[in-house]
Image: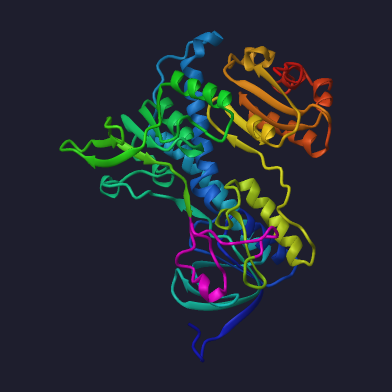
Amino acid sequence: MIDPGDVVEDVDLLVVGGGKAGKTLAMDMARAGRRVVMVERGMIGGTCINVACIPTKSLVTSARLARRAAAAQSLGLSLGKLEVDLPMLRSHKEGVVADMVELNHRQFLDSGMDLVLGTARFVAERTVEIDVNDGGRRIVRGADVVINTGTVPRLPSLPGLADVRPLTSDTLLRLERIPERLAVIGGGYVGLEFAQMFAAFGSRVTVLDHNPRLLPHEDADIAGVLTDCLRQDGVDVLTGAAVKEVSRDEEQSVRLVLEDGRTLVADDVLVAVGRAPVTRDLGLDAAGVRTDERGFIRVDDTLATDAPHTWAVGDVAGSPQFTHVSLDDYRIVKANIEGGSRSTAGRLVPWNLFTDPELARVGLTEEQARATGRDIRGAKLPVDAIPRARTLRETRGLWKAVVDRRTEEILGVALLGPESSEVLSVVQTAMWAGMPFTRLRDGLIAHPTMAEGLNALFTKWVD
């Protein structure tokens, strides 16, 4: 609440939460001479740098190297016994994160923005009260306000779960130990990356997913090949496995009871069943900002909320939970604040699952394409048909494409194989440009590269 004697600071832009979209907009506006305040509780650089993309992909790199080292003899090398040094592993991850946090902090200050470390709560439209971390209180009102508070791991209401002190994607990254037995509840992106990672580090890992198969929104053949790869790497995958209750026994092991009566015993349990928005304590009612039934901020396709001159970006706005989407949210809001007209409509959103092999996807699945009623053609290429994959001795995987038979437009691809996240951009660029698939089929692509496989993929029609 604003008291009569309170001093209200008026600024051009107030950003609540320093995720990718918010921090980029704040720096841009500050460099342009606007008065900008950005409030961040303490995670400088946002979720991606501190507890998501950057630390996890740093550890994925270590896990991939561990698997390569274990297979070194196939490449003509003898490397001896592989050992995971937990302090060194932790130092590697923390070093990468610290460097990026320092870079972000320096960029924030150099931009000229007013970076406030503290907790903000709305007390009126476009106005927040800030409890500053090092003491004191400020009230700031923005001509425009952007909310970018992100999400946190969601814990389901599961009997006994809180009592066993479950791990989340945040806490597991502290690397306090390598569990001998790790149970992972949830078979989505986060669960699968961690499952395969810790299997490479020596854990006996079991993934429990309530769906009939992994990645139910992906085509079944792609998901099936990935499931086989995980099992080959020592991950026990149990689908159709809904957890009923969790407890610790006398020896402090975690006991998971499934709905069908099966039980599983582990040393630790990782919960990876999605993320919840950070909105509960923001005082959004005072700001005139409404949320949906899950707590995500309601926005239209310009990312405007129900309140005037108030925007929400990134995960908290219900955008697809990828850093590259948050960066595009920044572009949209910046254009609209400056009087332009830009929206989220028609965005072609790519995503990458950094398992080994990687799964990269853009556009429609086969099932989605058929549901449009268009006359489609499908193509499939086993990764072992790509020469570069053979030189890498990484031949697991399957590439798949769907095109419109009449227009020859590429509707979507799923690339499961080595370096797929890099190859995906080639296809996405062709889709942006409206090129027919023949441009990739007949294009002069360097040999031997993984991208060269696109020449072959668009000749391997299965219907």
| Image quarter hosting the C terminus | top right
Residue farthest along the left direction in this orientation: 250
What's the residue at 49%, 63% (across, down)? 279
Image location (x, y in percent) of residue 27: 67, 61
What's the residue at 78%, 36% (across, down)? 431
Q: Determine whether 269 is above or below 220 in the image.
A: below
Residue farthest along the bottom direction in this orientation: 4
Residues 285 and 42: in front is: 285
Image location (x, y in percent) of residue 460: 72, 16
Residue farthest along the front direction in this orientation: 373
Image location (x, y in percent) of residue 260: 30, 32
Confirm whether the magenta stretch covers residue 201: no
Residues 265 and 68: in front is: 265
Q: Determine whether 108 is above or below 91 in the image.
A: below
Q: Determine whether 457 is above or below 5 in the image.
A: above
For the question of whether residue 106 can be seen, the reply is yes
**Residue range (magenta):** 277-304
In this rendering, would 404 be left or right of 125?
right
Q: How many marks?
A: 0
For the question of whether residue 122 can be seen, the reply is no
Confirm whether the magenta stretch covers residue 281: yes
Q: Main secondary structure of the magenta part?
A: loop
In this rendering, would 46 be left or right of 331?
left
What's the residue at 52%, 10% (across, down)? 77
What's the residue at 48%, 78% (across, down)? 137
In this rendering, would 178 be left or right of 289?
left
Image location (x, y in percent) of residue 448: 73, 16
